[in-house]
Image (tube, rainbow, N blue to C red):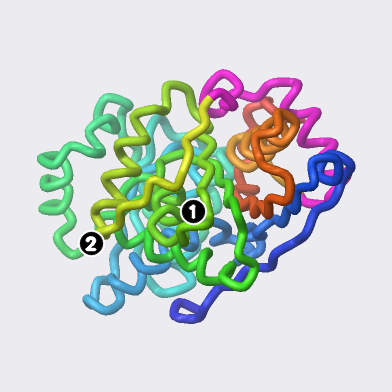
């Protein structure tokens, strides 16, 4: 599976709002790529795994929060493709955390970092120290976001070449998926990025840095803030009601941290008339459904 094309299905959606604005909407179902390595996490990991395999590296180390989709996917990928995995987790141990339970069952070694130490995860000197501590490991950034990730995400546009969308919209957490789409998108396809955290404008520089790092110049994208619902992992009653109605109408399950906020933003932008009549939109379902269990465990969802 590592070298095979993914080509996740494209599911059309129709409703009264879309008809009223003469908008075509299809959902790119990356949540169906793999039961455990789903969505953008599989795409971002793909070429990191291939690079490690080609270099003879059998150990992968990365960072994540206690309920991280990336950590969950990395552990599953390690188990599936025979890599040893190490997860450096922000915060304190919790024996009932379903994400960590899954990661351990998939063979991941878990080490907890204080929040102070975790803040060093982008510090070159700290990363050098880690590399010296784990000389035979490939260090993958938090969220899987690096140059190798862009190639995997960019394959989405190859899969959509015949569909030829005017817009592709994605949630944005660390910027890797947005950057991969920008780097691969043809001139007629505009990328819409919806950040899921507050004060996210710093990500614009991160995204531009990643895109220029692969030798691409593309200004055909927009970073639209204001749909974070109060911040990362913040969930409003309005968002939950929207998700409930969305799932009833489409039979597609989404979660409130990433895909839910993106689809909520898309709905509002269509109502505002942001997209010209006749637009063909593809919305990227980035997966992350495993995180629902953690939200329930913490009492944030019933």
x, y (%) of residue 65?
A: 43, 37
Question: Gap in Å between the C-alphas at discs 1 and 2?
Answer: 18 Å
Nearer to me, 90 or 281: 281
Tell which tag, 1 or 2, sits nearer the viewer: 2
**Residue 105 at x, y percent in the picture:** 52, 58
Left or right: where 290 falls relative to 211:
right
Q: Is residue 268 above or below residue 250?
A: above
**Quick one: which residue is furthest to the front in this view?**
277
Looking at the image, tell me whether mark 1 or mark 2 is earlier in sequence order.
1
Task: Give the vertical position of 82 relative to 45 (above or below).
Answer: below
Q: Residues within 10 Å of mark 1 (few under 14, many from 20)?
A: many
Q: Quadrant of residue 273?
A: top right
The numbered mark at residue 188 is none
- In the visual, does 23 lie left or right of 286? right
Q: What range of the chain is rendered magenta?
A: 226-252
Q: Residues within 10 Å of mark 2 (few under 14, many from 20)?
A: many
- Helix, strand, or loop for circle 2? strand
Q: Is residue 119 above or below residue 87?
A: above
Which residue is rendered at x = 22% and y = 33% of the image?
Answer: 120
Instruction: Note whether residue 65 is visible.
Output: yes
- Horizontal placement of 290 versus 212: left or right? right
Residue under circle 2? 137
Which percent across, then down, holds residue 58?
A: 29, 71
- Using the rendered image of the protein, determine whether residue 107 is visible from the camera's viewpoint: no
In this rendering, position of residue 123 left or right of residue 160: left
Residue 259's place in the image compared with 280, above or below, is above
Q: As rendered, which of 116 and 182 lies closer to the eye?
A: 182
The residue that label 1 is drawn on is 103
Q: What residue is drawn where x is 25% and y is 59%?
A: 215
Q: Secondary structure at mark 1?
A: helix
């Amino acid at each position: 599976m590592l070298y095979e094309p993914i080509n996740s299905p494209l599911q059309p959606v129709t409703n009264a709002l879309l008809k009223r604005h003469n908008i075509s909407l299809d959902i790119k179902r990356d949540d169906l790529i793999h039961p455990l390595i789903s969505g953008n996490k599989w795409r971002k990991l793909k070429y990191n795994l291939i690079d490690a395999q080609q270099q003879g590296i059998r150990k992968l180390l990365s960072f994540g929060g206690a309920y991280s989709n990336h950590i969950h996917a990395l552990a599953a990928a390690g188990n599936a493709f025979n890599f040893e995995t190490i997860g450096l987790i922000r915060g304190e141990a919790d024996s009932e955390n379903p994400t960590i339970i899954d990661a351990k069952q998939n063979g991941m070694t878990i080490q907890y970092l204080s929040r102070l130490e975790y803040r060093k995860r982008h510090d070159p000197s700290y990363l050098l120290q880690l590399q010296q501590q784990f000389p035979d490991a490939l260090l993958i950034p938090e969220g899987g976001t690096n140059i190798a990730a862009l190639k995997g995400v960019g394959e989405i546009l190859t899969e959509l070449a015949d569909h030829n969308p005017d817009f592709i919209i994605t949630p944005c957490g660390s910027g890797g998926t947005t950057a991969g789409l920008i780097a691969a998108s043809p001139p007629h396809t505009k990328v819409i990025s919806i950040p899921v955290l507050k004060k996210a404008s710093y990500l614009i520089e991160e995204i531009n840095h990643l895109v220029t790092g692969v030798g691409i110049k593309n200004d055909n994208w927009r970073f639209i803030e204001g749909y974070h619902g109060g911040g990362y992992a913040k969930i409003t009653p309005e968002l939950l009601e929207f998700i409930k109605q969305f799932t009833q109408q489409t039979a597609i399950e989404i979660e409130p941290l990433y895909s839910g906020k993106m689809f909520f933003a898309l709905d509002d932008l269509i109502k505002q008339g942001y997209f010209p009549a006749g637009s063909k939109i593809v919305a990227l379902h980035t997966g992350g459904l495993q995180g629902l269990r953690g939200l329930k465990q913490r009492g944030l969802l019933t």
